[in-house]
Amino acid sequence: MKAIVTGASSGLGRDMALYLAELGYDLALVARNQARLDTVAQEAQRIAAAHGNKTITIETVTLDLSQRHACEQLFEQYRNERIDLLVNNAGFGLFGDFTDTPLDRELDMINLNVVSYHILTKLFVRKFKNDGHCRLLNVCSAAGLLVGPRLATYYATKNYTLKLTLAVAQELRRDHVPVTVSALCPGPVETRFNATAGGKFLTPGASSRAVARYAIDKTLAGKLIIVPTWQVKAGLFAARFLPWSAQLRIMDRFDAGR
Ligand SMILES: NC(=O)c1ccc[n+]([C@@H]2O[C@H](COP(=O)([O-])OP(=O)(O)OC[C@H]3O[C@@H](n4cnc5c(N)ncnc54)[C@H](OP(=O)(O)O)[C@@H]3O)[C@@H](O)[C@H]2O)c1
């Protein structure tokens, strides 16, 4: 079994990769920072050995996935190999009012959170349809079901990715294609996300390790929408009954910024 994990050098991607190593998966770990990828690869190898999986192979792939050609390069590298699981996870956010945040940074975010997910989902799902019995996990966010003042672009990117993922999943289900597509929708998680985004949420983050393990277990069980904590489940349920004006005011406080 082999899995590709993007954004594997840190946070959720790292923790999902380590859990997959524990389960005995061969790994392709993708991110920009080679040194961090090497550290995760060493850790994964140790964990695999500790769980009796001495023979797993781990490749590191250094790519900036906000570039279209890098997404295509990743696909080309693996198009002729059996891939059982792709985890599209690399992404980032940016706190600040929309009129203050830099346009270039937002376009980078759209290229990574939206365009790279779009490209990799299309290319790999086409491949998976031929290969059969493969799984795709797109790391979206609870943000994909909400609106986000002070994180406007980030929430909008996650709305795109979540809605794309759900629609693709339905097309595959309708046609009885043996490929499952899942969307991970966590609330705040303790990772480098806040440091990169320059802000913080009102509530403390969940454990990255716990969310990662839950996400992989549910993905391997073929679950469509994965919401890891009861607090986020309850919040998303309540949000359905709120008028937009109330939801916007609450979310404006939740995404507190610095
Ligand atoms: N933490 C949260 O509260 C939270 C909540 C909901 C959803 N999420 C989502 O979870 C995913 C993972 O984020 P995280 O929280 O684990 O944050 P993180 O610790 O900052 O990890 C982000 C990962 O993405 C990689 N990455 C960033 N830009 C990249 C690029 N241009 N090309 C390739 N890789 C890139 C980073 O590696 P390099 O810097 O080495 O490239 C890193 O491995 C994101 O999609 C995020 O939106 C996070």
Image (spheres, rainbow, N blue to C red):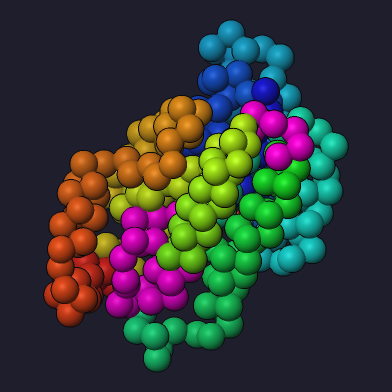
Q: Quadrant of the N terminus?
A: top right
Find the magenta span and give its range: 129-157
Looking at the image, which residue is at 53% across and 59% down?
Answer: 164
Based on the displayed image, in which of its 4 quarters is residue 146 positioned?
A: bottom left
Position of residue 254 in the picture relative to residue 128 (left or right): left
Quarter of the C terminus within the rendering: bottom left
Q: Is residue 23 above or below residue 214?
A: above
Query: Residue farthest to the top?
Result: 52
What's the residue at 69%, 31% (across, down)?
Answer: 132
Residue 84: say if magenta. no
Which quadrant of the structure image shows residue 63?
bottom right
- In this rendering, would 154 be left or right of 76? left
Q: Name the side, left or right, on which 97 lies relative to 159.
A: left
Answer whether residue 198 is visible to the viewer in this image: no
Please determine whether, in this image, residue 3 is positioned above or below residue 188: above
The residue furthest bottom is 99
The one of 169 and 138 positioned closer to us in this rendering? 169
User: Total marks drawn?
Assistant: 0
x then y, percent, for residue 136: 58, 41
Does the segment drawn in magenta span residue 156? yes
